[in-house]
């Protein structure tokens, strides 16, 4: 009986964490926007090669949306933490003024989270686009092998994987995120 109570308690404690990690309609909508922006910027062929090198254009878009839904969820969670921290450092009135709360003084926190998450989302998309363009240029560079110890683009980035392009983009976009704006 005691084990059942402990297990029940642990299961109930996990529900809020699971709920926070869920893909919300807002995150999914933003992810679709992010993917459309990438597809338009990179072109359909490069976009497909990035997300689904051996699949269809439809599966590439679905994979992009799945990936960016997770990123959007993380952006919202990070933004909420940042806004809580900022909110604790100022008066309620100053926070409400800064984030243009409604007439009733509410929703400043929501506006803070939304603005920060959107800014982070834009940065993620731009980092991916920039990385994809850099990798495309490297892949098309006739002197790539000479500059990389005789290895081709696929050998250098793929290391036995069929998705050398995706690995290149992933590495370069992570570098861009670490460097910051």
Image (cartoon, rainbow, N blue to C red):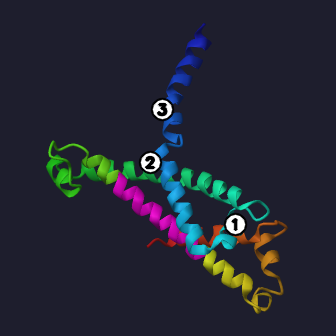
Magenta region includes residue 89: no
Q: Residue at x 34, y 57 (%)?
A: 115
Residue for badge 2 = 77
How far apart marks 3 and 1 lie (CA) works out to 36 Å
Assign a secondary structure to mark 1: helix
Left or right: 42 with respect to 72? right
Instruction: Please provide percent x and percent y for residue 166.
Output: 70, 67
Q: Quadrant of residue 140?
A: bottom right
How far apart marks 2 and 1 lie (CA) works out to 29 Å
Q: What's the mark number on residue 48?
A: 1
The mark nearer the N terminus, 3 or 1, is 3
Q: What's the mark number on residue 16?
A: 3
Magenta stretch: dominant secondary structure: helix
Please give the range of residues in magenta. 114-131
Q: Residue furthest top?
A: 1
Query: In this orientation, does residue 178 appear?
Result: no
- 117 versus 102 height, above or below: below
Instruction: Please provide percent x and percent y for residue 139.
Output: 73, 82
Left or right: 1 with respect to 178? right
Assign a secondary structure to mark 2: helix
* Nearer to me, 160 or 123: 123
- 2 versus 60 height, above or below: above
């Amino acid at each position: 009986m005691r084990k059942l109570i402990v297990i029940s308690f642990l299961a109930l404690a996990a529900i809020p964490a699971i709920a926070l990690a869920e893909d919300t309609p807002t995150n999914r909508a933003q992810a679709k926007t992010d993917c459309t922006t990438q597809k338009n910027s990179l072109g359909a062929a490069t976009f497909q090669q990035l997300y689904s090198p051996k699949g269809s254009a439809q599966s590439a878009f679905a994979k992009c949306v799945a990936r960016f839904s997770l990123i959007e969820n993380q952006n919202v969670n990070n933004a909420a933490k940042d806004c809580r921290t900022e909110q604790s450092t100022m008066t309620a009135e100053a926070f409400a003024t800064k984030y243009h709360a409604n007439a009733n003084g509410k929703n400043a926190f929501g506006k803070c989270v939304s603005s920060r998450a959107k800014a982070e989302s834009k940065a993620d998309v731009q980092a991916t686009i920039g990385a994809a363009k850099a990798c495309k240029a490297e892949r098309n560079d006739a002197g790539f092998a000479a500059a990389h110890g005789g290895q081709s683009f696929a050998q250098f980035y793929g290391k036995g994987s069929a998705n050398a392009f995706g690995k290149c983009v992933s590495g370069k976009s992570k570098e861009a995120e670490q460097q910051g704006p």
